[in-house]
Image: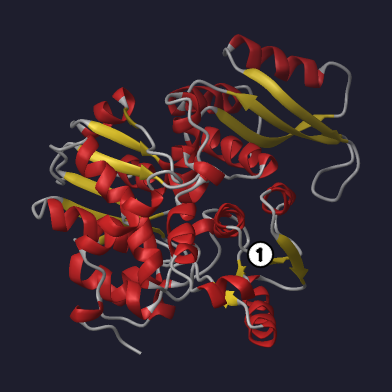
Amino acid sequence: MSASGSDLVSLDDVRAAARVLDEVAVRTPVEESRALSAAAGARVLLKCEHLQRTGSFKIRGAYYRISRLTDDERARGVACASAGNHAQGVALSARLAGVRATVFMPEGAPLPKVEATRAYGAEVVLTPGGFDDSASACAAWAEREGAVVVPPFEHPDIVAGQGTVGLEIAEQVPDAGSVVVAVGGGGLAAGVATAMKGLRPGVQVVGVQAEAVAPAAALLAGRPAQDGVRGHTIADGIAVKQPGALTMAHLRARLDGIVTVPDESIARAVLLLAERAKQVVEPSGAAPVAALLDGALAGLPGPLVLVLGGGNVDPLLLLRILRAGMGEEGRTWSFRTRLPDQPGALSAMLALIAREGANVVAVEHHRYGTRFELDEVEVYLELETRGGEHIAELREALRADGYALD
């Protein structure tokens, strides 16, 4: 299936969605980031869509789609499959519209997202397996019960609803030179590009995908979608293996390009946003910031507006991501070494580390194993450090004192 130019959502369609969403969606703020502006050498602003109701932009498209159902369709209820943001967007939208909602989620979905979806009023059905299994269960149930499936991206109403983010950006930052948005299924990027190109044709609109799951980037380059899918990413909100025909038609016609970023850069972006901007943003929402930190946006005209699409991150995952980000920034360093199995050996090494100005976070001391001699012990240490140069100084000092580092 392909979508022609006449099938594309128009600026008028996005404006119609904005009128419906006026009293439903929050007009999220735009905040300037001095840290990112310094890194980019241009003014950088953050469109804080993670502060939207339900914690992401998804309520815009979901509510607009539900608002356009016929009375008969509303009576039959709606359904969707999602592991997170779309589930919550549909659940709250259905409650606001007075429509029954059933949401299919994988059994392994983060508990906070499952509980939030229930709290918004939806019936949650947990299914074995992953997202594809939930989607299959949702489709079979909806066909059997006559419910209307609200898709996460592949529908004109969804694209129009998400496009209201672009309308707001055009009003809030009238001199914007570039807008950068994460791409999963492509609904948000398609909608934002539609609004921006309709109002400010000269503005560059660029998408961002995770390196490990970048099917839209592959398709835009003329390759099969599966060429862009090479593994797992922490940015699960944009880990869509096959974007839709409708959304890809919009991206081909209106997007100025897609860049990709590694998970390490996404982790750094989540850390920077939490530490410098005081914003808790999920990995997929932080992807545009990761692209800037990677230098992937060099040459784009400013001011740059980076869309932070969502903030629904599991606290345990957030902790791991922040630790990974600190490692990428050189703020922590872990290593293994072997010491003589005698009193004072460990304290001597710790004294050296203290003299070098590092702080010990964790120590593991192993006396038994096959990787070292009988008169040795193995020690694993995690340190707080001050950056790459400090780590290099620590390495040199430890090796100079005879410690072999793994």
In percent of the image, x 65 and y 77: which residue is there? 138
The image position of residue 6, as x and y in percent, is 19, 80
The residue at the far bottom in this view is: 1
Q: Residues within 10 Å of mark 1 (few under 14, many from 20)?
A: some
Q: Closer to the camera, 265 or 370?
A: 265
The quadrant of the image that shows the N terminus is bottom left
**Residue at point 13% right, 50% down?**
203
Q: In the visual, does 381 lie left or right of 400?
A: right
In the displayed orientation, state which residue is furthest to the top.
Answer: 355
Q: Quadrant of the C terminus?
A: top right
Relative to residue 393, is residue 255 depicted above or below? below
Viewer-side residue, 179 vs 352: 179
Q: Is residue 218 left or right of residue 95?
A: left
Mark 1 residue element: loop
Closer-to-camera residue (183/84) = 84
Where, by quadrant of the figure, is residue 189 drawn?
bottom left
Way the structure is coloured: secondary structure
Q: Could you say which quadrant of the image residue 253 lies in?
A: bottom left
Q: Amino acid at mark 1?
A: Arg
Say if 372 sits above or below 5 in the image: above
Q: Is residue 301 above or below residue 247?
A: above
Say left or right for 148 vs 289.
Answer: right
Residue at the (83%, 16%) spot, across then down: 344
| Viewer-proximal residue among 47 and 227 | 47
Residue 243 position, x and y percent, is 41, 74
In this figure, which residue is indicated by the disc labeled 1? 100
Q: Residue at x 50, y 20 (%)?
A: 386
Q: Which residue is most to the front? A: 71
Can residue 359 be seen here? yes
The image quadrant of residue 81 is: bottom right
- Residue 121 on image: x %, y %: 69, 54
